[in-house]
Image (spheres, rainbow, N blue to C red):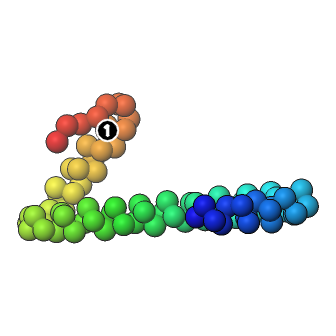
Amino acid sequence: MAAIEPRLIEKLEKLPRERLSEVEDFVEFLAAREERAAAAQRLADALARLDALNLPPLADEQIAAEIRASREERRSGTQRRT
């Protein structure tokens, strides 16, 4: 990427000032897209590890209990240890 940087800087220096904010917005958009892609990959990896445990599915009441506990945690500001 080092070879790209001087060329990119030259091009940026030639742009009018008002266009630089557009470039900055676009770069921020690209960075956010990369962050989302990385988060999606981490989620997929976590789901694969979870699936590999071959645990039985939770019953509806277990899911409801987890949701209630999580909401209560949020309200009280404490963290539950599992």
Determine the image quadrant of residue 6.
bottom right
Image height of 51 relative to 71, above or below: below
Task: Determine whether, in the image, residue 28 is placed left or right of residue 54.
Answer: right
- Assign the N terminus to one quadrant of the image: bottom right
Q: Position of residue 63 (x, y in %)?
A: 21, 57
Q: Position of residue 45 (x, y in %)?
A: 27, 65
Q: Position of residue 64 (x, y in %)?
A: 24, 55
Residue at screen point 49% across, 60% down: 35
Image height of 23 relative to 67, above or below: below
Residue at screen point 56% across, 60% down: 32
Number of other residues with Cα within 10 Å of mark 1, as a class: few under 14, some 14 to 19, many 20 or more: some
Q: Which residue is mark 1?
A: 72
Determine the image quadrant of residue 76.
top left
- Assign the C terminus to one quadrant of the image: top left
Observer-nearest of 31 and 48 = 31
Image height of 21 relative to 3, above or below: above
Task: Determine whether, in the image, residue 40 is placed left or right of residue 1.
Answer: left
Q: Position of residue 19 (x, y in %)?
A: 85, 62
Residue at screen point 13% across, 68% down: 52
